[in-house]
Image (cartoon, grey):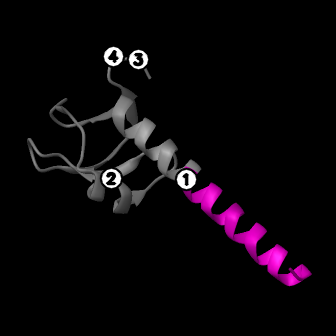
Amino acid sequence: MQAYEILLWFGGGVVLLVLLLGALSTARFYRHEQFVCPKCSYPFQPRLRKYLFSQNAAGGKILTCPNCGAKEYMEPQRRDGSK
């Protein structure tokens, strides 16, 4: 095996590791966090697709509340109510 082949395998392994860690982090967050609408105080968890592809802001996301329809900046909160 030549040096470039070793580097190619190593680079591919690093990319796969980063993707796996990102997927695990997202799954953990998605299981334990929710968003609360600032207008109507409705707690909800967006669908995974909406969560992944919504606009990001400094510490939260810009999401549409399924209860009142308000499109607002929302910060994630733990499901037990603590931040």
Residue 20: assigned label: 1
Mark sitting earlier along the chain (3/2) = 2
In front here: 1 or 15?
A: 1
Front: mark 4 or 1: 1
The residue drawn where x is 85% and y is 83% is 4
Q: Are marks 3 and 2 in contact (CB under 8 Å)?
A: no
Asked whether the viewer can see residue 72, the reply is yes
Quarter of the image where one finds residue 34: top left
Q: Which residues are magenta?
A: 1-20
Question: Of label 4 and label 1, which has the lower sequence position?
Answer: 1
Q: Residue 49: where, in percent of width, then height?
A: 28, 58
- Image: 38 above or below 1: above
In this figure, which residue is indicated by the disc labeled 2?
51
Q: CA distance from mark 3 to mark 2?
A: 20 Å
What distance separates the C-alpha of mark 4 from that of mark 1? 27 Å
- Amino acid found under the numbered disc labelled 1: Leu
**Within-10-Å neighbours for mark 1: few <14, some 14–19, many 20+:** few
Contact (CB < 8 A) between labels 3 and 4?
yes
Predominant secondary structure in magenta? helix
The answer to whether marks 4 and 1 mark residues whose Cβ atoms lie closer than 8 Å is: no
On screen, residue 25 above or below 14: above
Q: Residue furthest left?
A: 67
Give SS at disc 1: helix
Q: What type is the residue that disc 2 sits on? A: Tyr
**Which disc, if any, is residue 80?**
4
Q: Is residue 33 visible?
A: no
